[in-house]
Each structure stands twice: as structure tokens, then as C-alpha cells.
Amino acid sequence: MPETIRANVGGFVRPRRVDVRAAAAFMAAVVPTAAAAQAAPDSSLMEGFVSAALALDRHEIAALTLTLGVTFFATVTAIMLVRTRVRAERQDAAARTEIMALKAEVDRTKALLLSQPQVIVVWPATGEEPEILGDTTIVTTSPFARRALAFGTWLAADQAHAIERAVDALRSRGEGFAMALTTVAGRHIEAEGRAIGNRAVLRLKDTSGAMREIAEMGVRHDKLLREVDTLHSLIEALPSPIWARDADGRLVFVNRAYAHAVEAGNGGDVLARNLELLDRAAREESRQARATGQPFTARLPVIVAGTRRIVDVLEVPTRGGAGGIGIDATEVETLRGEIKRMVDAHRRTLDQLATAVASFAADQRLTFYNASYRALWGLEAGFLDQNPTDSAVLDQLRAARKLPEQADFRQWKTELHEAYRALEPKEHWWHLPDGRTLRVVTTPDPEGGVTYLFDDVTERLNLERRYDALIRVQGETLDNLSEAVAVFASDGRLRLFNPAFVNMWKLTPAVLSDHPHIETVVEWCRSLHGDDAIWGALHGAVTGMERREPMTGQLERRDGSVVDCATVPLPDGATLVTFQDVTDTANVERALRERAEALEAADRLKNDFVHHVSYELRSPLTNIIGFAQLLDDRSTGPLIDKQREYLGYITSSSAALLAIINDILDLATIDAGAMTLDLGSVDVRKTMDAAAEGIRDRLKENNLRLEIDAAPDIGTLKADERRVRQVLYNLLSNAIGFSPPGDTVTLAAERANGSVVFSVTDNGPGIPTELQERVFDRFETHTTGSRHRGVGLGLSIVRSLVELHGGTVRIQSSAGRGTAVACAFPLEHAA
């Protein structure tokens, strides 16, 4: 039947009638069912679809499609929901069944676990608190299950540490373990740890019956193993050879010391080769003792690592053989010999002593005496060698009137013999009838004997008397010295002083006799002299503990006097202080010092004057030389012969004066430390030729010859070429000035001891020995009968330039035999 449908077309709503059958046909075409989708549409359906589509506009079709789609989605969703719910109900029922089965299995497992006395601890991988199952009373009496993990409360310390380390390894690295434990209560526990899944599980099980016996045997076995290991380690560490034999006498065990003694690599090598430490005879004696069941002991010589040693051998029989040890007794034998030699040396030493020594045993018989004892009392050696008693010796000495006179000799001897029962030494003084005085010391021995020491102190007493007299003489000497003397003891107090000390510092003997301290004495003396530095040094020299060194100083007192102070440390720790008035000497020294300073100032003024004047003279002298050369030039005009002769004199004199000024300037530069060297490679032969070329005119003028002696391969040296040439020129000029006409001057060079030595030799009058040390001084010139004249600077410059190069200059000359000057330049400049 037709229905009215409201449609929205162009914004207006208008009713329209729609055929329901046409709509159904359209739905069948748009949303086909599963059966309609498989079947091919017939023509009538297609016609209906077309007619229905023609009857609807596009908005109505869209609304209809949306409605049908929602309906289809809801239907499909409902069907799927029903199917899912059915499936979930089935899975829930299966899960409930499985959970019940697992709970039943867990209950059975717990029942099985708890059926035995054990504790199971489970640690989750997440680090949560462990789960503890079982009866914890097997390990602890505490009602708290957590106490089972406090291993130290129910285990010994070593076992607690062991299981704690094992549990840590189990939880951190999953390492399983199994160990037998014994609680402090005596129960045996088997501990086993395993990693199961992601959990760490520890099981503590109480062992009983056969398992308990096995556990106890395991504990005893472990204990025995530890003891055996300890003994084995101890035996291996012992320095003495140790061995074990079987019933046939073959070696079955040796330690490292045995292997070292027989020079084997190890114990296995010893057993394989059956290396014996003892010789055949010793082994045979040991076998015989072992056969009788007796231990074998002997001190035998053996070879240990190639060295002969003395060994105490002990071999005892055992069930399966024997065990032995060799203890090195070489040092004991050596010490025994040393003790014997020491005793003999002690006796020989006592024989050399001036003190008489006699030892008596507990039975009061003589056991030892030295030569001084026999000489002191004049006793016969035969009597003393019979070991007489102490009383017999005293009786014989009394009969010979060699003992002090006593009113009751018996009582005196009894008191002397109390030394045999005394604990401390006692001293006696015997005044003998012959005038000698003996100091007698009775020293009790631990064994009950007594040792007598007789020291003749007659000479010592005489020395003491002479010493007292010497002290009195010394005191008188000090009292009469003009030098003030004071002695301060090691505690800083005044012990000795003389009147000069009292008078110098205006003190009184009364205050000094109280032995004041050095600080007090310093305060008293400060009124005359207040220099704290001097008094502080004096105080330190007297009271210093670490360093005791002599101290000297000078005091200028307020009254104008000068005092020298000195301290001398004395061997007994005291300090001797002396004060000497040196006012007159100080005044003379002050005058001499002022004079020396004045002379030094005059010398500096002279050098400054020479330096200044030399510079000031160079400018006019240069002008004179220049104008002389200009006048000599023929282009300036003709000169008569006499004028030209005078001009030559001017030129030569100016040149000589310029050379002198240059020498003075060089010396001033050297003195000021401003001279620098232009170091370089210097050809020795060329330098010698250049120096010779500079004096050719003077050689010709003086009718002299120059010989140059140098090897062609003399080579070079490192120096300032201009200064070397200047040295050679000055030496040649000096030689020319002292050489007679027609003579020969020699310039030589050679290599010697890492240096190049230049020498200039002439046959002039020579230099006397007393003048040779002065020829190098400035402004020192000695003609010695020659025609040489000069200011005395040439050789001074030579020595200064050579020493500036790090070289040396030496001169060889004697009167009438010429002069040779040698200059040594090091090959490598060392200035």
C-alpha cells in the first residue's frame, strides 16, 4: 500500500507517494542477500530495479541505502557477538578445570615437599621478598621464618660465609651449588641451590640415618683433607728435606727442600730417579733400625745442592714404611765452634788485661785466672792449676803478707765470701802493706760462683791528685789572663769566669758566683752593648742542642771600645766564651781599610780618565792624520824635500799614537766586560801571513828577517780573526823592537792538546826572571839595553785577548838568550 514520504527537495518539503514494491525491488538490487548474490538476476528483477530507480530521486536512494547498511551491520554484529560469547564460555570452563587441576597438583607438591624436614627458599627474578616454605625449626629455633636466611645465627662463621657467597652467586649469575653444613646445634644440613626458570631456589634438608652418617663422614673427610693439605703445605714450605719410604725402602714422597737438596727439578723427578740424599751406609743403618722398630737418629755429613752440610737425620718407622727429616745443623756446629773460639779468645783477651780476673765456681774452687792475677799476687802456676779453694788462696796470700792487715781475719773472710750468696756486685778497697791500693769487685755468677776483679788504682789516685793540682794551676792562669774568659755549662749556666771577665763587663763576683743563666748574663752586659744580633748568636752558641759550632763576632761598645767575641764548644757539652779588647787593632784596621778604599777609588778615577782622554784624543788625531795624508797628496801642491820628510814624521808619529790610543781603548773595553768576539772559522796560515804583512816595513827598516813555520795542513780554528791577527802583530812588534839588526824573528804555529799554539821567538837580550811576571802588566816597559821604546800595552793586550778566547799565554826567556812567547788558542772557543 502506498505511504507518504517526506522529501527535502530544494529546501521545500513536499509529500510524495512511493510504491513499496518498487522500494523492495530496489533494496534487493542494492543489498543482495547471500542467495540472491549467487543467483543471476532475471529480467523481471532488473526491470523492477530499473522501474524502482526511475521512481526515486538520488536523495531518497541515499537515505534508503544508509538505513539498509546500518540494519545489515547491526545484524552481522549481533551474530558475531553471539558466537564470541559461546566461545568464551567454553574457554572459561576449560580454564576453571585446568586451574583446579593445577591447584590440586600444587597441593600435592607442597605435601610432598613438606613431608620431609626441609626448608625451601624461592627468590623471584623481580627482586621481591623471598618465599620461605617448610619447617624452619631444623635450622633455627626462632618462630620467624625469615631467621632461616640469617646464616650466621645457626652456622659457624666459615660455613656461613661460604653459603652466603654461594647464594649470592646463585641469585646474580644462576650458579648452582651443593654443600653439607653442620649447625651450631650439631644437626647436619644438606644445602642445594639451583636456578629454576627465572627464580633462584635454595633447599635446606635435614639429613638422617644413613644420609646423616654419610654427611658426617663427608665432614670428617673434609676436615681430614684440610688437615692433610695443611700438613702438606707445611711440609712443602719447610726448609728441611723430608721424605717417606715404603716397606721396601723406596722413596714414595719428598718435599721441595729434598728435591732442591739432590738438585732435581721436582718431587716427581726424585721419585722417578730414586735420588737418595743419604749415603749407602746411612741407609743401611736406617734399615736395620727400622727392622727393629726403632727410630734412626744420627748427625751425618751430606751434600745439599752441591754444598757439604752437617744434617741431623731422624727417620721413624710407620705402618707402611718410614718417614724421615734432615735438619741442617751446620750453623749449630759452626756456632759451637765459634763459641769455643770465642771462649778461647775471651781467655786470651783477659790474659792481656791489666785488671786481674779470677773466677770461682759454686764450690768455691778456682776455675779461671788470667796472667795479671798471677802477676798481681806472685802465685805459682802449679798451685793455681790445681783449682784451689777461695779460702786456700786467701790463706796463702795472708801468709805472704800481701792482704790488708785485719784485726779479725776470719770475720773479714766471712764477709768477703758473702758474695757467693749475694745478688748484686759489691766493691771493696784494699790498702796493701806495700803501699798499693786495689779496687776489688766481687760479681756473683748465676750458677752460684763469684768472679773477682782486682784493679790496681794506685796510679789513678796519683793522677787524681796531680789533676787537682793542675786544676788549681789552671785557675790561677785564668785569673791572671788579660783576656776575659767565661765557661757556660750544657744547661746554659755560668760555671767558670776570671777577673778580666768581671772587669770588662763591670760585674761583681758575688752575682756571678750564683751561676746565673746565659740570658741573665746577657741582660747584665746589654747596658754596655745593645746589639741584639750578637747577643742572640752568643745565646744560641751556648744553649744550642742540635748544632754546636764555634762562633766569632765583634762588639763595638757604647764607651767606644771594640771587643772580639769567640765561642769554643768543649767536649763535656760546655761552651768557652772569650772576650778580647781589640780597640787599638780595630782602629789600625779601619785606617788601612779607608786607605785601601781610597786607592781603589783613585784607580777607578785613573781608568775613567784614561778612557775619556783616549776617546777625546781620537778625533783631533784623526784630523791630523787626514790632513797629513792630504798634504802628502801631490795634487794639493808641491812640497820641498824637507817638508815631505817632516810630513813623514808626522804621519808615522800619528799612526803610532793612534795605535796606542786603540790599545788603551781595547783594554778599557775588556776591563768593562764589553768586549765581544766575532767568532768564526780562522785560517791559521792566512792569519799568520796577514800579521807578517803588517810588519814588513818595520822588518826592512830594522834589517830583520821573518821566518814563518807552520805545517801546510794546519787547518783552521774557531776564533775572532781580527783579534788573533792583533795578537800576532803585537807579538811580532815586540820581538822586532828587542831583536838586533840582521837577526831573525820566527813565527810558528802547531796543533797540541786540542789547541793551536802560536809562538814568536827572537834572539834579543831576553827578560830577567824577576821581570817575567811583570811584562804583561800595563804600562810596564823594560828596554833591557835595547832600542825598544813603548808604553807597555802590547803584551797586556795579548794576554787579555788570548784569555778572552779561553786560551793561555806563557813566556820562556833568560838573560842573553832571547825570548819565546807562546799563545794557545783552543780549537773550540771556550771563553
Image (spheres, grey):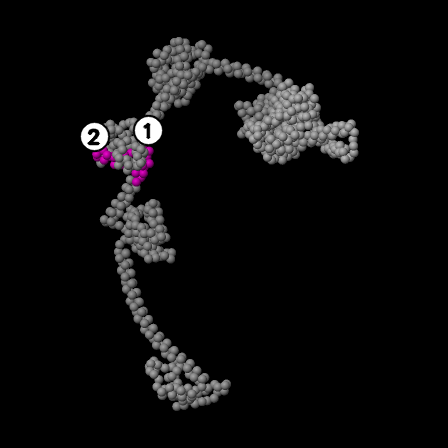
- What residue is rendered at 34% in x and 14% in y? 385
Residue at far top of view: 400
Quarter the N terminus occupies:
bottom left
Q: Which residue is mark 2?
A: 292
Q: CA gap, disc 1 to disc 2?
A: 33 Å
Q: Amino acid at mark 1?
A: Thr
Left or right: 210 in relation to 257: left
Q: Amino acid at mark 2?
A: Thr
Asked which secondary structure carries label 2, the reply is: loop
- Between disc 1 and disc 2, the foreground one is 1
Q: Quadrant of the C terminus?
A: top right
**First reached walking from the N terminus: tag 1 or tag 2:** 2
Q: Is residue 246 magenta?
A: yes
Q: Which residues are drawn in magenta?
A: 229-253
Q: Which mark is residue 405?
A: none
Around disc 1, counting alpha carbons within 10 Å, would you say few (fewer than 14), some (14 to 19), or many (20 or more)? few
Looking at the image, residue 482 sits to the left or right of residue 279; the answer is right
What percent of the width, then of the height, locates residue 568? 57, 24
Residue 106 is situated, as x and y percent measured from the top left of the image, at: 29, 60
Residue 564 appearing in the image: no
Q: Position of residue 11 (x, y in %)?
A: 50, 85
Numbered-mark total: 2
To which quarter of the image does residue 594 belong? top right
Using the image as rendered, state which of residue 568 and residue 746 is in the foreground: 746
Q: Which residue is mark 1?
A: 307
Of the pair 314 and 759, the residue shown nearer to us:
759
Q: Is residue 168 above or below residue 789?
A: below
User: Callout 2: 10 Å neighbours few (<14), some, many (20+)?
Assistant: few
Residue at x 29%, y 48% (from the top left corner)? 180
